[in-house]
Image (spheres, helix red, strand yellow):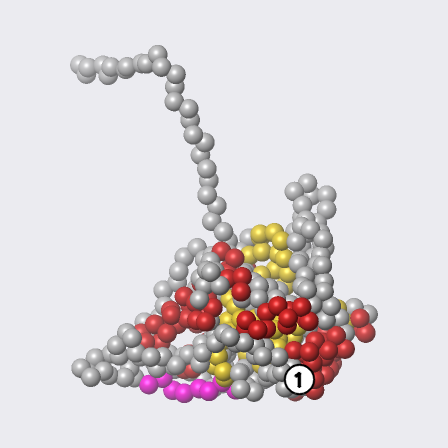
Amino acid sequence: MKARRRVVTSRAAPAKRRPTVRRIKSAILPATRRVLPPAPVAPTQGGNGATQRQVSPPTAGRDGNRPATDQAVDLSVDLGRGLVLANPILVASGTFGYGVEYGDVVDVQRLGAICCKGTTLRPRVGNPTPRVTETPGGMLNSIGLQNPGVDAVIDKYASTWSRWRVPVIVNVAGESIADFTEVARRLDGVPGVAGIELNISCPNVGKGGIQFAIDAEAAGAVTAAVRRATELPLLVKLSPNVADVRPIARAIADAGADALTAINTLSGIAVATGRERPLLGNIYGGLSGPAIKPVALRIVYEVSQVVDIPVIAIGGVTELADVLDYLAVGAVAVQVGTAIFADPTLPARLVEELAAECRRRGLDRHAPLIGTALPKRAGPPSSKGVEYRP
């Protein structure tokens, strides 16, 4: 017969139960890290003008083994007109302020380039609140290009930028071709301004408010006008909110752009808690983060096949595997955006991880990783009935 277990009770007041706190991991960061491939891959010639070469066997060190882990790797990227980046990791416009805001957190000099906040001809107060909300796999933002105007940006930040080694590319927005060209003219020749990135996902008041970015003729016209107004390196940012981005990309390249950045945010909305109205004060917002990466990959893949200028990828970069994916579909560099809000140190860390990955593969530069997933000849666009092919 088993002995009974003695239960001891206490007259003291029971201990106060602490509430259970459920920690929610942000959807901006990847749930798991993918395992990188063990061996080098052979590249194919891409259509974006990036230098390609056959992957060579690992270079032996003095002792006949693989290169030492401290071997220098050339990560430089030439975007044209003298703009050469030390590495292919940039920070995206709207996620890194003007660079100075992160000076105490990140060594900005380790970055390939900084794309500063969107800048307009005149100051803008931005959209009504709420402006930002987290979504599954990313976030929606509707800031409304709040900024002090181009003259104030030059006065406040250009002298600091001129003392940095890292190039600062000013993101420019406007509602007319005249707005874009005037901002570009004022930035031209300013010490510290290394280039311009055109945000053409703006309403064109001359065409009834239709975005420049969704019309090939308008996109080409604004690019050509800015090209005439400045000798600065000119990047143009593509919108994903189109059926076929390839004619627009070609029009921009033909108009004199030095590089393309792809992609801008996708248009979306969120619904307020009571489900009586949209959540954002401006109703519509731009979706960014890991949720848009497949779309961005597709657009970079398509565009890289039809233009001969460099393509810089944007969309859902949270780890090295994302960088390698974008390089494989033709990008020469990437911009890190939404993930910075969760981890401001990520871009600088990706620089080191990319160099380490090149050494692991026996490469002395990252160029052989570019375009390895591109077809030998340009294929049809995704708009050709992608879901319904027999």
- Provide the residue span drawn in magenta: 49-56
Q: Is residue 299 visible?
A: no
User: Element type at marker 1?
Assistant: loop
For disc 1, the marked residue is 230
Q: Is residue 310 visible?
A: yes
Determine the image quadrant of residue 240. Answer: bottom right
Q: Is residue 51 magenta?
A: yes
* Residue 92 relative to residue 282: left or right: left
Helix, strand or loop: magenta stretch:
loop
Percent x, y of residue 297: 53, 70
Percent x, y of residue 8: 28, 14
- Which residue occupies the foreground of this view, 77 or 49? 77
Determine the image quadrant of residue 264. Answer: bottom right
- Which residue occupies the foreground of this view, 267 or 16? 16
Percent x, y of residue 164: 50, 74
* Residue 74 relative to residue 99: left or right: left
- Which residue occupies the foreground of this view, 245 or 217? 217
**Residue 315 vertical placement versus 249 (above, below):** above
Residue flagged by tag 1: what amino acid is it? Thr
Which residue corresponds to the image point at 81% horizontal and 73% vertical from the top-left?
Answer: 207
* Residue 373 relative to residue 283: left or right: left
**Residue 131 vertical placement versus 331 (above, below):** above
Dot 1: few (<14), some (14–19), or many (≥20) neighbours within 10 Å?
Answer: many
Q: Quadrant of the C terminus?
A: bottom right
Which residue corresponds to the image point at 69% horizontal and 43% vertical from the top-left?
Answer: 275
